[in-house]
Each structure stands twice: as C-alpha cells, then as structure tokens.
Image (cartoon, grey):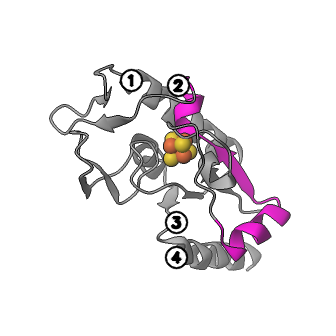
Amino acid sequence: MEKIFISACFMGENVRYDGGHQSLTHQVIERWKKENRLVSGCPECLGGLPVPREPAEIQQKDKKIITLQGVDVTENFNNGASKALSICLKNNIKFALLKESSPSCGSNTIYNGEFSNTKIVGQGITTQVLTKHNITVFSEKTIDALIDALIDAINDSET
Ligand code: SF4
C-alpha cells in the first residue's frame, strides 16, 4: 500500500512549538486514516525538541536554525529530518504531506529568519532531506496534487 508521511500536527497532535496542533480537516484525510495509509511524525519532536518550544527560523546568511532567544537548534532539526527520512524509507513512502512555512516542514515557503513574520520562497529542513531522497513533499495548499499523484502511483503499481 502507498503510505503517506504526514505532519503530526495535521493529525491533531499537540506538537507545535506553541503546544497546539494544526488539525487538517479534509474528506480525503478521513479516508486515508480509515485505509491506514497515514504515518505521522513531528520532525522537531523526533529531533529531541520539547513541546512547547521556542519558535525557530532558518537564518538566510548561514542556514543555521536559531530560536527567538538565539539558541542554535540546527542539530535538533537535522536529527529530526534524518529520523523522518528513516520512517519514510522503512515504510517505502514516496509522498509526504507537511505543514507549509514551518522551518522543518515547509515545502514552498519559510519565514525569513528575522522573526518579522515575513515569508520567503524556501523549504524546511525535513522537506529538503526528503526531497533529496525522491520523496515528494506536498502541503495543505497542494493536497489536490497529492491526491492526483497518489492515484497515479496506485494505478502504476497495478499495471
Ligand atoms: Fe507540525 Fe512539522 Fe512543526 Fe512538527 S515540525 S509541529 S509536524 S509543522
């Protein structure tokens, strides 16, 4: 079965930096849950960061991930990305559905590293790692493209 790696916060898990979640309500999510197609994980928690935690952003000058108070959490983010990749490889996963704009999970935009609430084009650390390993990352904004890609993959595997 084609499984999908999904941000744990989309599944209603309270793993966000602010202690909350980002439940994704979409008909297809309910169907995928019933089909046991979803494998959830929070890369930042997998990397050893607590909940709640300080917000962090990717610095544009050196690509380090620094919290609002100036703590370097790059290693946690890299470890979390590696663990997310391991989960995907173990489950033979080709597709991920990750939260847009997160410094781990963003696939089209991230914040600019200045904590000024400004988004720029870019990818989070986990998205970068998964993409390098041929896992296609979608977000809540591109879920229709994921549905199409999944249908194509299922059709291909049956022919
Ligand atoms: Fe959600 Fe990803 Fe942030 Fe974890 S790291 S809270 S899964 S957006």
The reply to whether discs 2 and 4 touch (Cβ–Cβ < 8 Å) is no
Q: Quadrant of residue 33?
A: bottom right
For label 2, the residue is: 49
Q: Earlier in the sequence, mark 3 or mark 4?
A: 3
The amino acid on which the numbered mark 4 sits, given as a three-letter code, is: Ala
Residue numbers of the magenta segment: 25-50
Mark 3 CB in 8 Å range of ligand 1? no
Residue drawn at 57 percent across, 29 percent down: 51
Residue drawn at 71 percent across, 50 percent down: 39
Mark pair 2, 4: CA separation: 31 Å
Answer above or below: position of 22 versus 33: above
Mark 1 CB in 8 Å range of ligand 1? no
Answer above or below: position of 144 versus 130: below
Mark pair 3, 4: CA separation: 10 Å
Looking at the picture, tell me which residue is in the foreground, 1 or 19: 19
Q: Position of residue 60 (x, y in %)?
A: 19, 39
For label 1, the residue is: 73
On whether residue 47 falls in the magenta region, the answer is yes
Mark 2 CB in 8 Å range of ligand 1? no
Would residue 159 appear left or right of 129 to someone viewing this image? right
Please say whether residue 8 is visible from this viewpoint: yes
Tag shown at residue 145: 4
The quadrant of the picture occupied by the N terminus is bottom right
The quadrant of the picture occupied by the C terminus is bottom right
The amino acid on which the numbered mark 2 sits, given as a three-letter code, is: Leu
Residue drawn at 44 percent across, 30 percent down: 77
The reply to whether discs 2 and 1 touch (Cβ–Cβ < 8 Å) is yes
Residue drawn at 48 percent across, 71 percent down: 142
SS type, badge 1: loop
Mark pair 3, 1: CA separation: 26 Å
